[in-house]
Image (spheres, rainbow, N blue to C red):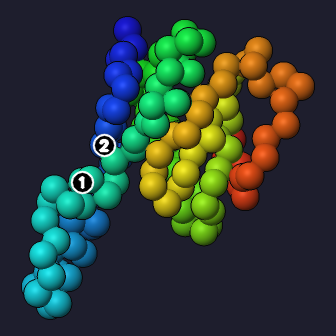
Amino acid sequence: MSDRLTIGQLYPASVHPTTLQRSANAKNTVNSDVSFESVLQKNMLKFSNHAAKRLEQRGIELGSRQLDQISSAVDKAAAKGSKESLILMKDMALIVSVANRTVVTAMDGSSMKDNVFTQIDSAVIIS
């Protein structure tokens, strides 16, 4: 059974203990106001209203495993300095604003055919 996606829903990316430890160390040394909530919010995968509508219109349901894969793909794109990335999964394509960790739009396999993807600077293929 897959999880249903609602408009404006946030999905937490994997928050690694090392990330939290670095944040805690930064707080102690720099005296900054980094909290667990701010780290969690920074690592959340978001879906724009447009993307949520496209997912619903095209009958695409994302399970927690797929959301983890997408989040991991966004992390990889961010590590390479990407700004706007195309994420290709089996029969689906997502355009993601990497800096905002926001899925901008989504397409199913039939919508992808004979389509040109513009304004992207990277592509991540998930098998």
Residue at the bottom extreme of this rendering: 29
- Quarter location, residue 100: bottom left
Residue 126 seen in the figure: no
Residue at the front extreme of this rendering: 50
Residue 6 seen in the figure: yes
Image height check: is 108 above or below 87? above
Q: What is the three-letter code of the residue carrying label 1?
A: Leu
Could you say which is closer to the camera, residue 112 or residue 57?
A: 57
Q: What is the three-letter code of the residue carrying label 2?
A: Pro
Q: Quadrant of the N terminus?
A: top left
Left or right, 108 with respect to 27, comes to right
Image height check: is 1 above or below 112? above
- Quarter location, residue 77: bottom right
Mark sitting on residue 12: 2
* Residue sitting at x 16%, y 71%: 34
Of helix, strand and loop, which one carries label 1?
A: helix
Q: Quadrant of the C terminus?
A: top right
* Residue sitting at x 47%, y 25%: 52
Image height check: is 56 above or below 48? above
Tell me the CA gap for discs 2 and 1: 7 Å
Left or right, 78 with respect to 108, comes to left
First in sequence: mark 2 or mark 1? 2
10 Å neighbourhood of mark 1: few (<14), some, or many (≥20)? some
* Residue sitting at x 27%, y 67%: 18
Spot occupied by residue 60 in the image (x, y as percentages of width and height): 54, 15
Do the CB atoms of the residues marked 2 and 1 lie less than 8 Å apart? Answer: yes
Spot occupied by residue 122 in the image (x, y as percentages of width and height): 71, 55
Spot occupied by residue 115 in the image (x, y as percentages of width and height): 84, 30
- Can you identify the residue that label 1 sits on? 40
* Residue sitting at x 50%, y 21%: 53
